[in-house]
Amino acid sequence: MHHIRDVAVLAAILVPVFTAARAQSPEAPPDTMAERVLACAPCHGAQGEGTRDPYFPRLAGKPAGYLANQVIAFRNGRRHYPPMNYLLEFLPPDYLKEMAEYFASLNPPLPPPATPAVGEDVLNLGKTLVTQGDAARNIPACVSCHGPSLTGMEPGIPGLLGLRPNYISAQLGAWRYGTRTALAPDCMQIVAGHLTEADVTAITAWLSSRPAPENRRSVPKGTYALPFACGSQPQ
Amino acid sequence: MTRKLIPSLRAAAALALALLPGAALAQNGAAPKSNGDLIAKGEYLARAGDCIACHTAPEGRTFAGGRHMPTPFGTLFTSNITPDPETGIGKWTADQFYGMMHTGRSPDGGLLYPAMPFGSYTKVTRADSDAIYAFLMSVPPVRQPNRPHDLKFPYNNRQLILGWRTLFFREGEFKPDPNQSAEWNRGAYLVEGLGHCGMCHTPINALGGNSESQAFQGGLIPMQNWYAPSLTSNREAGVGDWTIEEISDLLRTGVSRRGAVYGPMAEVTYNSLQYLTPEDTRAMAVYLKSLGQEPPSPATSTVPRAESSLLLSLGKTVYDQHCAACHGAQGQGKPPHYPPLAGNQSIQMSSAVNPIRMVLNGGYPPGTAGNPRPYGMPPFAQTLSDNEVAAVVTYIRTSWGNRGAAVAAAEANQLRSAPLD
């Protein structure tokens, strides 16, 4: 009998709580993209500006086509990072493109440049590879595709500034080892295949220590000609 | 068949069922008038069976197979079901296709591994099997040889399947229950047959079999480390106190006023359930609601009382800082986009695997025709410590009238390495 009474008392306590929770008319979340991409904020920042974590890249202001290629590659498992693959797996491509356009439209300030932890000669090698390449080793200059001010070109070529050294070297390493791939012809994999580990260190150090350019927007499609065909940038 | 015809055909089918228990269960009950109708019906039924989810590899050609399926016994590779005569099923007849669906044997008599849900598909009617066959014969053939399975000894011996079949396989088409409505029977046919819901929602034992006596009682999905809730317990996903609309919304759009689909269920809504008619998801809802009968059993915790009170106070701090903006200070949510946590069964189940994983991994409900631009939850694996995860999950499991049990930091820690793909 006690048991039954206890249950009745418990029910008397619980039922009003449930009813109260249901009776409130809960508000709807704002009908904005900013609200819809809140799931990205802990790793990429509320404005896509990046966070203190050195491995999570800035998204803001990268060309929409580049960002769309990346989110679709994560969705399909071509680009492999399980937390991203999981988050995007069941989102329709049109919606992912909308997210890409949203982050492309943001323009928060770039972070202060990193202080390079390498010697002058390494920095100089980095500067040479980025601005001139090394024709003898079939290494084109980064600027020949990513632009003279390294801010990228619409729609598919990302800017290279505002990224942290760990992220740059991890991505160059992934291209070199073939764990990061893109649509054929996969120009970045070909280029990175010609780099040594010392080259990666040098490029990383120089790129991440560049100050922010005055205009950090990507230049429009066709502003300059690419030195070779690239699957991510339809000509 | 056009959408307009469906209501009158449904009425005719319902009448046929009411008069003749055991008559055809097909919602599109009348025999298709042309081959085009048959193919369209088959395409719809193939969606209901979610064939594409397993028989299409990531970035692969549709239905050409080759998707790897990790199992506790090794890796299986799904087969090519396009009509290519050499590498697909182009040489199969409709009889042979039905034989495979119904008995789990390929045309040469070979035994299928039960990763192919023939234990459920055996319930599919001959007419529906023929429609699916006609549809598959109409898709573009893809020449892609099947990749051999990579199973560990002794599971690479197909004779073992005989033993499995003896224990777990019951051959036979779905038998309608004459005491239930046509809608209930249609729902039962879809849930138990093509929907193969029991593959995840019925506990799997060490032999990889589903036990009939525990049908729809829930269980941890092997290799994925998500808990498929019981469909019979109202403490879990039992939907006895949900409205039919809420259940149907959840299945077809991925969100509802009571909760959202997540984890492996997001795949099911994305690839399969969103394509079903509202009438069919409603029928499934009617059937599922009727399953929720088991009386609640109290949740028990292994966490000492002193520890759980500490967890609670830390949990409230974490909740107010990270969760309340979306889920509300009282766990009321902003449904359907931010699910309510108060009274949410998914959070109070005896297994705390799912709420812990939601906090660690976050997630988006699937983008569907009914909810094409879903809102998402951030992953907190990088921001919260094991203690904070355990604390906030303990807090939401025990606040606002929720009656779940406290969880320990060690449980949160273990699930950090759960697979995400």
Image: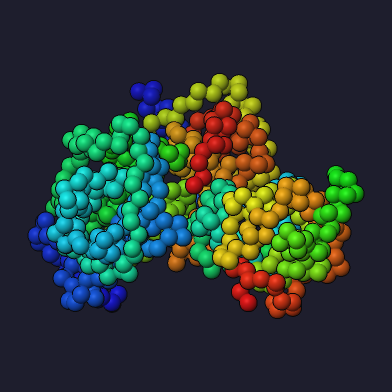
Question: In which quarter of the view is residue B206 placed?
Answer: top left
* Residue B101 visible in rendering: yes
Position of residue B81 relative to residue A15, above or below, is: below
| Residue drawn at 57 percent across, 45 percent down | B361
Q: Is residue B29 left or right of residue A173?
A: left
Q: Is residue A46 left or right of residue B67?
A: right
| Residue drawn at 47 percent across, 52 percent down | B260
| Residue drawn at 39 percent across, 46 percent down | B69
Question: In which quarter of the view is residue A48 placed?
Answer: bottom right
As drawn, the residue found furthest toward the left would be: B20
| Residue drawn at 18 percent across, 67 percent down | B29
As drawn, the residue found furthest toward the bottom would be: A222
* Residue B26 visible in rendering: no
Q: Residue B416, position in %: x, y?
A: 57, 37
Who is closer to the viewer here, B362 or B176?
A: B362
Who is closer to the viewer here, B41 or A36?
A: B41
Q: How many marks?
A: 0
Who is closer to the viewer here, B173 or B92?
A: B92
Q: Is residue A76 left or right of residue B202?
A: right
As drawn, the residue found furthest toward the right would be: A120
Question: In which quarter of the view is residue B321 placed?
Answer: top right
Q: Residue A178, position in %: x, y?
A: 59, 52
Q: How is the image coloured?
A: rainbow
Q: Residue B176, position in %: x, y?
A: 16, 53
Who is closer to the viewer here, B341 or A36?
A: A36
Q: Residue A1, position in %: x, y?
A: 35, 23
Check the picture and name the quadrant holding the N terminus of chain B. Answer: bottom left
Position of residue B381 relative to residue A25, above or below, is: above
